[in-house]
Image: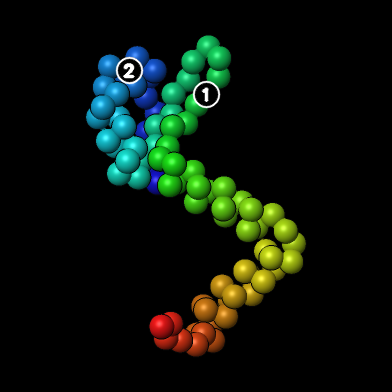
Amino acid sequence: MDIKKIKLSEFFDRTESVIASISRGNAVEFSTESGDFVVLAKEDYDSITETLYLLSGDKNRKRLNESLLEAKDGLVKSIKLD
């Protein structure tokens, strides 16, 4: 995901094209007097929050890391799901 920093005025001036860019997997960042903000597609947000959830528990994080190492070492089995 690419994050492009833009001015808030640009976001409002080009809302349609900015939203189209976001829907293609990009994100935008802009700053206001109230703070800094990032706008991204809900699918990307959901992916990030799911990853954080899966990595939040020690046991699950350890099992995921072990699985990644097994896959990297070629210790995986292909199965056919019906």
Q: Secondary structure at mark 2?
A: helix
In the rendered image, residue 58, in percent from the top left (x then y), is placed at 74, 62
In the figure, 67 relative to 26: above or below?
Answer: below
In the figure, 24 relative to 9: above or below?
Answer: below
Image-based side of 11 in relation to 16, left or right:
right
The residue at 55%/19% (across/down) is: 35
In the figure, 24 relative to 67: above or below?
Answer: above
Whether residue 3 appears in this view of the structure is: no
Image-based side of 53 in relation to 78, left or right:
right
Q: Amino acid at mark 1?
A: Asp
Q: Residue 2 has which mark?
A: none
User: Which quadrant of the figure has residue 30?
Assistant: top left
The residue at 37%/24% (across/down) is: 6
- In this view, the residue farthest toward the front is 82
Q: Dots 2 and 1: beta carbons under 8 Å?
A: no
Please name whichever residue, 5 or 17, is drawn nearer the observer in this view of the structure.
Answer: 17
User: Which quadrant of the figure has residue 57?
Assistant: bottom right
Residue at mark 2 to residue at mark 1: CA–CA distance: 16 Å
Within 10 Å of disc 1 (Cα), the crowding (few <14, some 14-19, many 20+) is: few
Badge 2 is on which residue? Answer: 12
Choose mark 2 or mark 1, whichever is in front. Answer: 2
The residue at 29%/37% (across/down) is: 21
Q: Residue 36 has which mark?
A: 1
Q: Amino acid at mark 2?
A: Phe
In the rendered image, residue 71, in percent from the top left (x then y), is placed at 52, 79
In the figure, 11 relative to 40: above or below?
Answer: above
Q: Secondary structure at mark 1?
A: strand
The residue at 51%/85% (across/down) is: 76
In the rendered image, residue 23, in percent from the top left (x then y), is placed at 32, 41
Q: Earlier in the sequence, mark 2 or mark 1?
A: 2
